[in-house]
Amino acid sequence: MHPQDEFGHDPTVQRTRAYFSQMETLDSRLIRNSGISKFDKRLRPARELRFRLFEAACSRAGKKGLRLDDNKALTLFEICQDLAFTKLGLSSSSTAFDPDLLSMAKEGMQ
C-alpha cells in the first residue's frame, strides 16, 4: 500500500514544489551547458557555496526592503550559482543579470 500525498493539493505546497523544481532545472542546465560531469568533485562544494551565497543574499534583500518574488528569487539563485561555480573553477553561464541582484550576491563573496 502506498501512502497518499495528503499535501499535494495544497496550493502553497504546489507552489513550493514548483519553485524547488525550477531551482533543480537551473542546476541541471548549468551542469549540462558547462560540459562537466555530474560526478565532478567540485560540484558539491560549488553547490554548498551557492546555497550559502543565496541564503545571505536573500537576507540582505530583506534587510534592504527588496521584495523577492519567485522570479527575482530564482534569478538571484542563478546569480549565486554562477558566482559559486566560477569561484571553484567551473564554467558558468554568461547571462547578463540585474545589477542590483548581482551586487547583493557579490557582497557574500567578500
Image: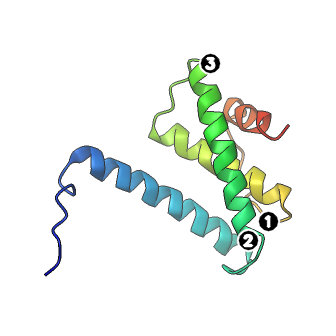
Sequence-earlier tag: 3 or 2: 2
Residue on which disc 2 sits: 34
Instruction: Name the amino acid type tagged 2.
Output: Ser
Residue 64, numbered label:
3
Which marked residue is nearer to the observer: mark 3 or mark 2? 3
For label 2, the SS is: helix
Quadrant housing residue 56: top right
> Left or right: where does residue 6 sit relative to residue 30?
left
Residue sitting at x 19%, y 64%:
5
Sequence-earlier tag: 1 or 3: 3
Instruction: Name the amino acid type tagged 1.
Output: Ser
- Between 56 and 28, the one lying in front of the other is 56
Residue on which disc 1 sits: 91
Residue sitting at x 13%, y 81%:
1
Position of residue 11 measured from the top left corner of the image (x, y, whole percent) = 23, 46
Question: How many other residues sit within 10 Å of disc 1, few (<14), some (14-19) or many (≥20)?
Answer: some
